[in-house]
Amino acid sequence: MAKTINIAYKGKDYTLEFNRNSVKALERSGFNIAEIASKPVSTIETLFHGALKMHHPAISREKAMDIYDTLNHKDELVSKVVELYGSVVEELTGAAEEAGVEGNANWDASF
């Protein structure tokens, strides 16, 4: 099940979510989640904007920041947005880990 964050802002509903394509778009633009400790302001702003763009592709960074600035419990929100981002990586690297699950492809190495 896809993870989402829903926000009601000035009478309109906004959904934050990531999928492979939205994460790749962020990464192509130079985004690096590892910079969240060294460049927190720009990283958090870019991450929040990127999460909105999946469902709201025309949303400007300025509008995204207007929404963000009105939200409470930002520390918890940022953690959840990072979790959204990380869930795509987890899905890519470990979603089908269970061997023997019907429909999963298997692989083997000869070395």
Image: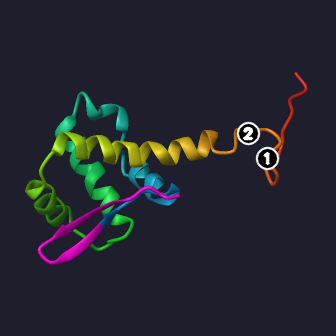
Q: Residues within 10 Å of mark 2 (few under 14, many from 20)?
A: few
Q: Whole-percent x and y of residue 84?
A: 40, 49
In the current view of this chain or complex, which residue is farthest to the bottom? Answer: 11
The residue sitting at the top extreme is: 111
Residue 105 counted in the magenta span: no
Give, as a single range, the part of the protein colored magenta.
1-14
Secondary structure, mark 1, is loop
Number of marks = 2
- Pointers 2 and 1 in contact (C-beta within 8 Å): yes
Query: In which quadrant of the rendered image does the C terminus lie?
Result: top right
Is 13 rendered above or below residue 31? below
Horizontal side, residue 95 vs residue 53: left or right: right
- Viewer-closest of 106 and 109: 106
Within 10 Å of the Cα at label 1, are there few (<14), some (14-19), or many (20+) other Cα atoms? few
Write down the residue under mark 1.
101
Q: Looking at the picture, which amino acid does disc 1 mark?
A: Val
Callout 2 secondary element: loop
| Residue at the extreme right | 110
At horizontal 14% and vertical 62% (from top left) the residue drawn is: 67
Q: Position of residue 35 (x, y in %)?
A: 30, 33
Instruction: Measuring from the top left, give residue 12's x and y in whole percent.
Output: 20, 77
**Side of 64 where 30 appears, left or right:** right
Residue displayed at 12% across by 50% down: 72
Amino acid type of the residue tagged 2 in the rendering: Glu
Residue visible at 11% across and 74% down in the picture: 10
The disc placed on residue 98 is 2
Q: Residue at x 32, y 71 (%)?
A: 56
